[in-house]
Image (cartoon, rainbow, N blue to C red):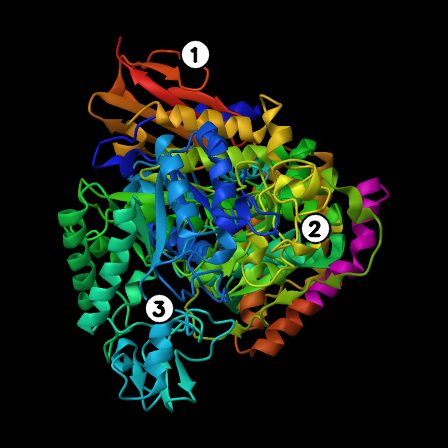
Amino acid sequence: MPLSQDPQWYKDALIYQVHVRSFQDSSGDGIGDFRGLAQKLDYVQELGVDTLWLMPFFPSPLRDDGYDIADYRSVHPNYGTLDDFKGFLEAAHARGIRVIIEMVLNHTSDQHAWFQQSRSSRDNPRRDWYVWSDKDTKYQGTRIIFLDTELSNWAWDPVSKQYYWHRFFSHQPDLNYDNPEVREEMWEVMRFWLRMGVDGFRLDAVPYLIEREGTNCENLPETHAVIKDYRARLDREFPGKMFLAEANQWPEDLGPYFSRGDEFHMAFNFPLMPRMFMGLKLEDRKPITEILQRTPQIPEICQWCLFLRNHDELTLEMVTDMERDYMYDEYARDRSMRLNLGIRRRLAPLLDNDRRRIELMNGMLMSLPGTPIAYYGDEIGMGDNVNLGDRNGVRTPMQWDGGWNGGFSTADPEKLYSPLMLNPVYGYQAVNVSSQKRFEHSLLSWMKRILKVRKSSPVFGRGSIEFLYPANHRVLAYVRSWGKEAILVVNNLSSSAQAVELDLRGYKGNILIEMFGRNIFPRVGDLPYLLTMGPYQFYWFRLRKL
Amino acid sequence: MAEESILTDDFLHELMNVGEVDVLVGLPTYNDAASIGQIVQAIRAGLVKYFPRQRAVIINADGGSHDMTQELVRAASITDLQHTPNPHALRTLHSISVRYGGGPSTGRGLYAILAAADLLHSSACAVISADSTNIEPEWIAHLLQPVCQDGFDLVTPAYHRHKFDGLLVRNLVYPMIRALYAKQIREPYPSEFALSGRLATHLFGQDGWATVAEQDGAKLYLTISAIAGSFKLAQALLGSKTRAQNSPPADVVDALREGVGPLFFSLDQQPAWRSSMPSEPVPILGGRPEVTLEPLRINRKRLYDLFRSGVSELEPLLSSIVSQATLQQLEELASRAEQEFCYPDELWVKTVYEFAASYHRAVLNRDHIIQALAPLYRGRAYTFLVENRDSQSEEVEKNVEALCLTFEKFKPYLGELWDGRK
């Protein structure tokens, strides 16, 4: 299957996020690798997604699961070789699957040769590749992101006897983007991978590239200038490739990352995600409609990226204190589930393994404006292990079957990079791909179906959204439109049956066709359109004027 | 009264959209345009501030206002329909305004609100009067939190009141309920109160509820039902109460119909008063209510005159209601000069009990009995005003306490009248 030639392919994409380490081990060393991932591309294709987003696979001391990169131009030996990566990339492309990789621009590992040289002496040519200071009092207005582990954004370097700046862990020194050499070198890194054929980058932690005194050192104009420069180079040299921003910011601060279509192609909609969970728990559409009203309009060629869960904690940075308290109380009453300002849990446990809620949340994910991302394992309802440190509890091995190591690896279980899920609810013997493939009504089969339905219409990826505001606030309803096509989406956020009357006068004369069963519903007339909905039920209707 | 007649189809339709709620605030109105906007805003602020996580609804039950009351209620409401995000509210705060059936009446309005609370499975419901112009958002917390958090079933208010405010409550309703039902509730038929969903459901299971709702005696009946049903009671200090300037002065007969009629009616419906129990205080949350003493101009002479003329004109009626001995004492009182006039506690208590017994036996049309009490009540009010003219707050309280004890002392007398032994 050839890759789509549409330069805006990312608007129609269905992204599947995978950690190479966690997906499939082909070498029997207990760690997933590129050959293993390549072996599972048929599964990815069958699932119905068309884009893979890989977490960092570069050489790294792995103190932050690969986000601490020690060499940007190679593959961590645990995961194979550069040739293995190339083989995987070709195989993916052959199946019509694009590959997005991580690019951690903001910082490196303290083990990276650049930092080692930089710290070696104050007059090293690479000294200015990082941000150094005699005092740890500069940039006082900057928040600390990893509150649970870091006390300051400065760390003392005993070698060169100065402080270095780090927005994340202290072993992740920030690169100095005021230095043109750094900017040039990082572009060369991106060119390296783009020439190899990767289809885009998820640019990690982009708001923090530049520091300025008297600011909060986030979202600065100088940071945007750096990104604009990279984007111009990308468009010039590699048309059709894509930048995805990881900018965990408030909606009003996210707009500038699209600028006039000359910065990022896509950005994660961080504020929306926790509010989807909040709306579900509150049984009230308000948090969702409210945040989407606050979400800025973006240029036509740009796109939001939506997700329910990913490799990080369910971040609660972009919520109010009251909302955060509520989320903690409802989704992480056990304090061990909390990390930094977030909740380190997977989708199924967050939703009490309730199939109806899992389906509803995925239904919203797939039908709200944006490109959806599914996190590996969530399509089968994998659980998490909060007893593992940091965010490792949501990064356990993929559960392929009920056999040895869940089909993930032939290694002795003790050798696995992470313990498998073993409990009777989420353990690999209960939750795995093989068993779910056998049943038409398994979560996996359902996920395949919804991805297929989503793929059947460009409206979801490209269309506008018009919220209906039925008097019943437990119902979230909207019409997605693109060209002559329109789709009505109705979600019951409540745990009980609901009646809802929709004002569809603007669509009078249309027939509603339910998109999963293709059944015909009554024609829209002058009266409010009455629907009754079961608990957590949702409908996608194609509106057709026949 | 058929339930359908009050809960109109439109009302039900709105409730359908609201769905199950945790807290409900009811606002009965009838031509309250002058005050309603600020009251709705205060309620909204209270709900958003103190109940951000709860599913909440404000229900305005209107009796058919002609002065844009309902429009003002709707305009004062902020929902996501107006695209006005409120960063402090987690959820949609529903606010609906509906007209109940059967024409304007306090009882019907309350009935509609409590029916909504019952239908929506609200765990707590507050009712706020449309003339409470000095309402603060904190009132919502003071009334509802004891229900939501502490498990109380009925929370009545306590106000800082002027010593001459609430004369009927002080001279009859409070002491009589205290004597008969053994609970010391200072505002037994309040304009603001909160109740649990459990109590609302209990009311709808009672035969008398629909009747009293139709007769505007619902609030008092509700209080007595809560006492008789051994529900958990509390009082919440709300501060001072200011009535809307456009509120008409209370007509004595209307006041008696609202306060005394349902009390007498309840004696039949809620016979728990027959068992003898010492009265006990009901906890007051948030501090002690104070008696205020600012100078107040009251036309006492008119009360005295109306007592005298009433006793004279209603003598044939009174002879059917009160005992011969009581009637004689009333006539003797009526013959006294103003400066010698005093309607003593004991005679007043006996009068009231004899009226209650006659109401029970329906010796006359019951409304006529209530009306006949009006001049006598005026005489008692005159005495209270004179007695406490120069009293400080403690003394006023002491006098009220003495009256309460007299009501308690003569409780057996009411029992004898009730059983026809007197």
Earlier-in-chain disc, 2 versus 1: 2
User: Mark 1 belongs to which amino acid?
Assistant: Asn
- Span of residues in magenta: B402-422
Q: Quadrant of residue A531?
A: top left
Q: Residue furthest top?
A: A546
- The residue identified by callout 2 is A412
Which quadrant holds the N terminus of chain A? top left
Residue A203: say if magenta: no
Q: Main secondary structure of the magenta part?
A: helix
Residues tagged by mark 3 and mark 2 found on one chain of the structure = yes
User: Mark 3 belongs to which amino acid?
Assistant: His
Q: Quadrant of residue B203?
A: top right
Q: Chain of mark 3?
A: A
Q: Chain of mark 1?
A: A
- Whether pointer 3 and pointer 2 mark residues with C-beta atoms closer than 8 Å, the reply is no
Residues tagged by mark 3 and mark 1 found on one chain of the structure = yes
Q: Is residue A493 visible?
A: no
- Whether pointer 3 and pointer 1 mark residues with C-beta atoms closer than 8 Å, the reply is no
Mark 2 lies on a secondary structure that is: loop
User: Mark 2 belongs to which amino acid?
Assistant: Asp
Measured in 3D between alpha carbons, the distance from the residue under mark 3 to the one under mark 2, in whole angstroms, is: 35 Å
Would you place residue A424 above or below residue B333 in this image? above
